[in-house]
Amino acid sequence: MERFIVQKSDPFPHHPLFGSMSSGESGRWGYRHIDHHLRQFGQ
């Protein structure tokens, strides 16, 4: 996670499916994506 937090390139690159996202949209998507995988393995 820290690798993505301190990333120096464009923080919100163009997503291949969702297109351009604001910082809020990107954060929401990232949270939901990680939450999905944690729930997948019972965390």
Image: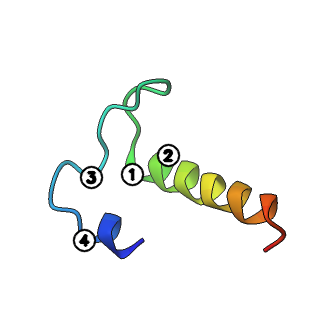
Q: Are marks 2 and 4 in contact (CB under 8 Å)?
A: no
Gap in angstroms between the C-alphas marked 3 and 4: 9 Å
Q: What is the three-letter code of the residue carrying label 4?
A: Val
Q: Earlier in the sequence, mark 2 or mark 3?
A: 3
| Amino acid type at mark 3 | Pro
Quick check: 24 above or below 41? above
Q: CA distance from mark 1 to mark 2?
A: 6 Å
Disc 2 marks a residue whose amino acid type is Glu
* Label 2 sits on residue: 25
C-alpha distance separating marks 2 and 4: 19 Å
Of the residues under marks 1 and 4, which one precedes in the sequence? 4
Tell me: 13 left or right of 35.
left
Q: Determine whether the residue tagged by mark 4 lies in a helix, strand or loop.
A: loop
Q: Is label 2 in a helix, a strand or a loop? A: helix
Q: Give coordinates of residue 25: x percent, y percent.
A: 50, 46
- Mark 3 and mark 1 lie on one chain; the one further toward the N terminus is 3
Bin the neighbour count of mark 3 within 10 Å (Cα to Cα): few under 14, some 14-19, many 20 and up.
few
Please name the residue shown 62% across and 52% down the image: 33
Q: Where residue 23 is drawn, which disc sits there?
A: 1
Judging depth in this view, the residue of 17 and 37 nearest the camera is 37
- Judge whether 8 appears above or below 26 on screen: below
Checking the image for residue 6, the label placed there is 4
Instruction: Name the front one of labels 3 and 1.
Output: 3
